[in-house]
Image (cartoon, rainbow, N blue to C red):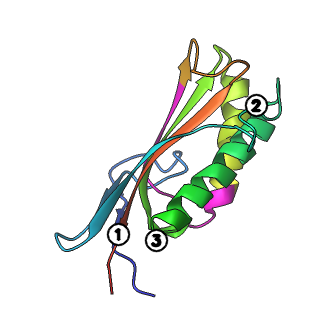
Amino acid sequence: MARAITLIRSDSLSDVAQYAYAATAPAESRLIFLAGACPLNDDGSTAAIGDYPGQAAKAIENMQTALTAAGASLQDVISTRVLVVSTRQADLGAAWKVVREAFGDHDVPSTLMGVTVLGYEDQLVEIEAVAAVLDA
């Protein structure tokens, strides 16, 4: 299936970042703006309390469900923002590792941020995303 997005890299920028530096979508693509994917179970309780990787995995799972409902997949995501409740880079890195593994070779432009608090009790991770698809 043809993808709407093009990931852009630059030889003039560091290759240390584990993502493309920019992405584009053609004018005829349909953009999908996702609410922040939270690590919530079906009953509304917070999954994997105290576990950064566990919460990142649940947030990815919930993001995939939302993408499917919108007619898209992780491969259609054009950018992400990963929010992690912590002041420790190791905690951010633990959540980021799960996100990077979920996206695989589709290394979309991303921002990883430490924040003071998120909306749900015991919530440590939230993932925002935008996707683009070409409708048939």
Label 1 vs label 2, nearer the camera: 2
The residue sitting at 71% across, 34% down in the picture is 44
Quarter of the image where one finds residue 27: bottom left
The label number, if any, that marks residue 5 in the structure image: 1
Q: Position of residue 19 (x, y in %)?
A: 49, 52
**Drawn side of residue 115 relative to residue 88, left or right:** left
Kindly state the secondary structure of the residue where label 2 is placed. loop
**Drawn side of residue 89 relative to residue 17, left or right:** right
The residue sitting at 46% across, 56% down in the picture is 108
Q: Amino acid at mark 3?
A: Gly
In space, the residues marked 3 and 1 are separated at their CA atoms by 15 Å
Classed neighbour count for the residue bearing mark 1: other residues with Cα under 10 Å, few (<14), some (14–19), many (≥20): many
Q: Reading the chain from its start, which is encountered first: label 3 or label 1?
A: 1
**Drawn side of residue 123 relative to residue 51, left or right:** left
Residue indicated by mark 2: 45
Q: Reading the chain from its start, which is encountered first: label 1 or label 2?
A: 1
Report the front residue among 128 and 22: 128
Residue 82 can be seen in this image: yes
Q: Amino acid at mark 1?
A: Ile
In space, the residues marked 1 and 2 are separated at their CA atoms by 34 Å
